[in-house]
């Protein structure tokens, strides 16, 4: 028992001296709190030793914690590149963030990086706050500081790319994303953002290469296949588009927008039965439901089933009155026009669709190509691909 107390005192006093000299060297008053706690623990032990008192287990645990465990933890943390003051500032900032007090969190973090400019976590937390507040340029500046201190922080590298994209600097964003994927090719979100940028720039062939590289690391990601399907659609490569949509729909059975795209491709190849089956399946997706009913009505007309055609088209117009404008432009509906309900456009509310701009663009392209396929009549079905030259020529007419 006596030996234990001697060992404790030697160890605790040694740690006290170490902390004292750290305070002097760093000129950091935050160490005073730790030194006071250590002194309290040492004092408790001396009192027990001098007056031969017996302290309870709770007090003994507290004594060891504040005199030995806490200073040893500080030494361990500082060995890993952080210091006590930095830890205190970060903890306080985190508390303010959790209580949604961003102002005070920023105040502590700015004070931290002013005192310790090399604080990796200080810059990162500050960048995240700026980003959350919408201060994108300030966030970028802080993320740059983060990367300077940790070259392996690929997530911060991605955040810079994302923010550049949001600021409209898409070429700079794309360049950063290519560099990032060169270092970390399995980063899915970087692949998706780069693919989006390339599609916005209509660099579809380059986008295909990016998605193919990503498939090596994410062979069962339905988003990659669905995105590839849309890219192949814009390239008029409907064979590969169909394969990608089918794969995406197989992986995610709830991806009804892929079923809708597949249905449109089957319309292009005049496979009415398969198109009808897929349009019926896609009715479970509200974003394409009116269009699916519209196309089901067209298929019914092609099959000579006027009753179903009337039923389907009236449901489509009820869901989206603007469908009526498409009906007026489509000669196939002339025989049943008197049975189609005319909508009240004055009471029509703007339909909210969650589809991305790329999805809308791909759907429009497929719908236009489906119409052109009816006119062309000489599609190269064997190659399963409409020639872009023929389509463009027909559109110019």
Image (cartoon, rainbow, N blue to C red):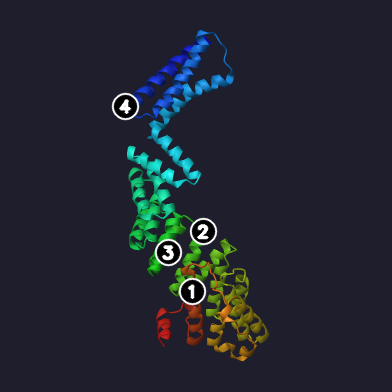
Name the spot of residue 47 as percent of width and height, x first: 50, 12
Name which of mark 2 and mark 3 comes first in the sequence.
3
Tag 3 near tag 4, CB within 8 Å: no
**Labels 4, 2: front one:** 4
Work out how far the residue at label 3 is from the one at label 1, CA to CA, in angstroms: 20 Å
Numbered disc in front, either 3 or 4: 4
Q: Percent position (x, y) of residue 332?
A: 57, 88
What is the quadrant of the N terminus in the image?
Answer: top right
Residue holding disc 3: 196
Q: Residue at x 48, y 12 (%)?
A: 46
Query: Dot 3, crowdedness within 10 Å: few (<14), some or many (≥20)?
Result: some
Residue that carries the numbered disc 4 in the rendered image:
25
State the residue at coordinates (63%, 84%): 341
| Callout 1 secondary element | helix
Give the image location of residue 112, x and y in percent.
37, 39
Q: Quadrant of the C terminus?
A: bottom left
Q: Which residue is mark 1?
A: 238
Q: Which residue is mark 2?
A: 221
**Marks 1 and 4, Cα distance to the nearest angstrom?**
70 Å
Tell me if 286 is positioned left or right of 144 in this view: right
Q: Compared to 326, does 80 lie above or below? A: above
Q: Nearer the viewer, mark 1 or mark 4?
A: 4
Which residue ends up furthest to the top in the rendered image? 51
Between marks 2 and 3, how big is the CA–CA gap? 16 Å
């Amino acid at each position: 028992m006596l030996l234990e107390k001697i060992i404790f005192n030697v160890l605790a006093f040694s740690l006290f001296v170490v902390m004292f000299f750290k305070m002097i060297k760093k000129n950091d008053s935050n160490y005073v709190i730790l030194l006071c706690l250590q002194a309290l623990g040492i004092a408790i032990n001396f009192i027990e030793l001098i007056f031969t008192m017996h302290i309870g287990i709770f007090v003994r645990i507290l004594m060891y914690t504040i005199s030995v465990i806490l200073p040893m933890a500080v030494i361990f943390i500082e060995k890993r590149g952080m210091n006590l003051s930095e830890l205190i500032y970060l903890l306080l900032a985190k508390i303010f963030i959790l209580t949604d007090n961003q102002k005070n969190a920023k105040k502590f973090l700015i004070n931290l990086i002013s005192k310790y400019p090399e604080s990796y976590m200080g810059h990162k937390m500050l960048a995240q706050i700026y980003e959350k507040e919408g201060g994108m340029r300030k966030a970028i500046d802080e993320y740059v500081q983060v990367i300077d201190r940790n070259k392996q922080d690929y997530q911060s590298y991605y955040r810079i790319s994302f923010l550049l994209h949001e600021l409209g600097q898409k070429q700079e964003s794309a360049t950063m994303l290519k560099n990032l994927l060169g270092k970390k090719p399995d980063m899915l979100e970087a692949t998706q953002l780069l693919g989006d940028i390339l599609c916005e720039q209509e660099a579809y062939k380059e986008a295909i290469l990016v998605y193919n590289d990503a498939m090596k690391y994410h062979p069962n990601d339905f988003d990659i296949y669905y995105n590839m399907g849309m890219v192949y659609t814009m390239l008029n490569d409907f064979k590969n588009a169909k394969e990608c949509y089918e794969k995406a729909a197989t992986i995610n059975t709830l991806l009804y927008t892929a079923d809708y795209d597949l249905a449109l491709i089957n319309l292009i190849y005049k496979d009415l039965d398969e198109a009808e089956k897929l349009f019926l399946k896609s009715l479970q997706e509200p974003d394409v439901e009116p269009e699916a009913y519209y196309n089901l009505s067209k298929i019914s007309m092609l099959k000579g089933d006027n009753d179903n055609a009337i039923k389907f088209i009236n449901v489509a117009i009820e869901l989206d009155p603007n469908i009526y404008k498409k009906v007026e432009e489509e000669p196939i509906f002339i025989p049943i026009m008197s049975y189609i309900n005319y909508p009240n456009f004055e009471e029509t509310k703007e339909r909210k669709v969650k589809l991305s701009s790329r999805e809308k663009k791909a759907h429009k392209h497929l719908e236009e190509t489906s119409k052109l396929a009816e006119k062309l009549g000489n599609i190269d079905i064997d190659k399963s691909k409409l020639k872009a030259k023929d389509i463009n020529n027909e559109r110019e007419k």
